[in-house]
Image (tube, helix red, strand yellow):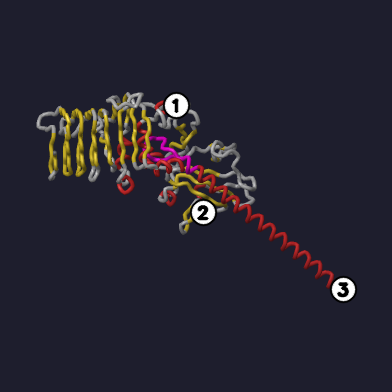
Amino acid sequence: MASLFIITVMSISLMLTSGYAAFSMMRSADQLGQAQRNAAQMDRLATLLQANLRPIRQDGVLYVPAPYQDQDGRPRLPSWLMPGSMTPWGAPYGYCVFAPAADAIASSVIAQPWPYAEAPGAHVYARAAPAAPPTLAAEGVIAALVSPGVGANTTPNCAAITLVDGRFTVPGGSVVVITQRPGADMAGLASAGRVVRHVAPVARGDGTGLSLVNAMPLASALGMWRATLPTTTILLLSAGRHELPPTLLSALVSTPDSEARGRRLALIGADRSGTVVALGTVVGGSPSSETTLRLPADLRIENLSFDGVGLEALPGVRLEMAGNNAVAVGRGPAVKVTHGVLTVQGALSLNPGPDGDGVLVMGGQATFHEADVTAIVHGGRAALASSLGASVT
């Protein structure tokens, strides 16, 4: 009788153990499936965020969509990006936004519409944000999507994201980061052989620059150029004064040579019918700040005047001027060649500063072919000066 009791108890225990094992296997499989679905969804959302980076401050830096605050004050993904985005178990994702540049650091996220508030399809972007942890900033991280662990609802803290053995992690959950790389549409521009954009003194229409009625400001166009660097970019400038902020002039010259070399940028004055005429004026900042347009890429100027903005051909760079152009600056030479190549055709009016020459060629080569050049210079200065073995034809 005792043996029968023991056998019965052992049978029940075996059944319970087998049932628990089966339940644990099913639960583990379900958790694994949820984790896999969550990882795939986070990758899709991160791709959407990456594709929607924009150069909103016209400085060539890419900015992320601004978060919205939930009822508890926690930052979440904007609903226009993907409405109702949650984990497979129903928990909301956390959205961490960091400053993409040293001059964009703030104690909290500061939002700005892009391209402008009234534009069709305009969205809000993070113009400034808290600084990223040092390890993340060193990797160019400007945002992160964080998820709680499977079955949990508590969103991990953005400040807890770390880089370990080349992998981003966060305690109590998972994370996918967004870095300072062109988004999908901007990557398409980067791979394009030729990009044409219409430029106006202020944004028109949707501000994309794809047509005259949707023209974009010059600073935005140059910011787009710096972020994408297509093989050839043509900017058609309409009538009016096109402002170039000193911060953008500084950012343009800091574009890495290895990325910009072999690229071509053309700034062309054009009227409403597309006919090339001398209409647009490029306006610079104060004489105390950066006032020279110089790129580590080939530049062509047609039918434009520059007021407070000088031009310079850097080493190995070609600067071409054709049609009817004018350059006036408050200090230094109007046009400078620093071991680069300058080619001038057509009419060119120069008004350098009291301490500068009309054209200063310091090494490199300058060629004036069928050119009509007029320079107003001050005492002791020359219309054309060369040194360091420069070749002038």
Mark 2 and mark 1: span between their CA atoms? 42 Å
Where residue 25 appears, x then y in whole percent? 69, 61
- Res 275 → quadrant: top left
**Which span is picked out in magenta?**
49-63
Q: Which of 344 and 10 is in front in this view?
A: 344
Where residue 65 appears, x then y in whole percent? 49, 38
How would you rate the neighbour count of disc 2 (Cα within 10 Å): few for under 14, some for 14-19, many for 20 or more?
Answer: some
Pick the quarter of the image with the N terminus: bottom right
Q: List the residue tagged with mark 2.
A: 169
Q: Residue at x 46, y 31 (%)?
A: 113
How would you rate the neighbour count of disc 1 (Cα within 10 Å): few for under 14, some for 14-19, many for 20 or more?
Answer: some
Where residue 152 appears, x then y in whole percent? 63, 50
Q: List the residue tagged with mark 1.
A: 205
Is 286 drawn above or below residue 37 in the view shown? above
Q: Which of 96 and 386 is in front in this view?
A: 386
Which amino acid is tagged 2?
Answer: Thr
Mark 3 and mark 1: span between their CA atoms? 88 Å
Mark 2 and mark 3: span between their CA atoms? 55 Å
Is 326 drawn above or below residue 162 in the view shown? above
Pick the quarter of the image with the C terminus: top left
Front: mark 3 or 1: 1
Which amino acid is tagged 3?
Answer: Leu
Which residue reaches farthest right?
A: 1
Name the side, left or right, on which 259 lies relative to 142: left
Where residue 367 appears, x then y in whole percent? 17, 38
Magenta-span inclusion, residue 245: no
Which amino acid is tagged 1?
Answer: Gly
Q: Nearer the viewer, residue 90 or 226?
A: 226
Q: Which residue is drawn at 20% across and 39% down?
A: 342
Which residue reaches farthest left?
A: 380
Q: List the residue tagged with mark 3.
A: 4
